Every structure is written in C-alpha cells, then in structure tokens.
Amino acid sequence: MKNIFVGNLSFNTNEDELRQAFEAYGQVDRVSIMTDRDTGRSRGFGFVEMTNNEDGEKAITALNGSQLGGRTINVNEARPKAERSGGGGGFRDRGDRGGRGARGGQRERW
C-alpha cells in the first residue's frame, strides 16, 4: 500500500477527478480531499492510497508537477501522521507575567 500526498489542488477539484488522474497508473483504494471543518470547503490538498507500491511510485513520478484543475500539483509520498502530545487546545499556565497590568503589557503606576 502506498499513501500519497497531493498538494496545491484547485479548490474545485473533487475526489472523482483526483481518482481518475491516479487510476491511469494502477488501482486506487481510497481518495480523500481534506476540507475545512467549519465551511466544508477544500483545503487544497488530499491523499491517495494505491494498492501497489510500484504503481504508487510511478504515479508520483508522472504526476508531480503536472496540471490538474488548472493548477500545478505537488505529489509525493505521504509522511506518517505525527503523534500529538498532551491534551491540546486547553488552558496552559504560562507562569508569571512579569507584573504586567491589564493594559496590554504596560506596568501599572501607583
């Protein structure tokens, strides 16, 4: 299995168009274009999973720098998803603020 990153996609490119571009080089298992959580609009990149590693390499070589939807796409092997540390998104204690008041970092005058 070859997991492939595709960047610089047109916001109008859909998963079927992306699948068709890669199917010319072998069997495609899955295609996903990343979308914004709030708007549902494309984020301009996606991933393609191909069954065969050799077919995936051929697709990367052939499609990197090619045109799709009027844009020059970047195609390369996807890096493994990085492990996230901690709970994330919550309140973080940043320690002492150095005596700054509530006026944008200015020291209070007594």
Image (cartoon, grey):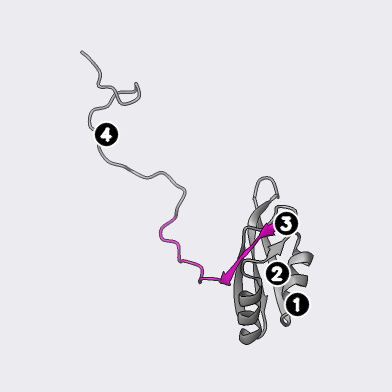
Disc 1 residue crowd, few under 14, some 14–19, many 20+, Cα 10 Å: some
Q: Earlier in the sequence, mark 2 or mark 3?
A: 2
Element under disc 4: loop
Element under disc 2: strand
Q: Amino acid at mark 1?
A: Glu
Residue 79 is one of the magenta-drawn residues? yes
Between the residue at mark 4 and the residue at mark 2, the CA separation in whole angstroms equals 47 Å
Between the residue at mark 4 and the residue at mark 1, the CA separation in whole angstroms equals 57 Å
Q: Amino acid at mark 3?
A: Gly
Q: Nearer the viewer, residue 16 or 57?
A: 57
Residue 91: percent from left, percent from top:
41, 44
Between the residue at mark 3 and the residue at mark 1, the CA separation in whole angstroms equals 19 Å
Query: Could you tell whether 25 is left or right of 82 in the image?
Result: right
Between the residue at mark 2 and the residue at mark 1, the CA separation in whole angstroms equals 11 Å
Q: Which residues are magenta?
A: 70-87
Disc 3 residue crowd, few under 14, some 14–19, many 20+, Cα 10 Å: few
* Residue topped by disc 1: 23
Q: How many marks?
A: 4
Query: Could you tell whether 86 is left or right of 24 in the image?
Result: left
Query: Could you tell whether 28 is left or right of 94 in the image?
Result: right
Up/down of 106 relative to 26, above or below: above
* Residue topped by disc 3: 70
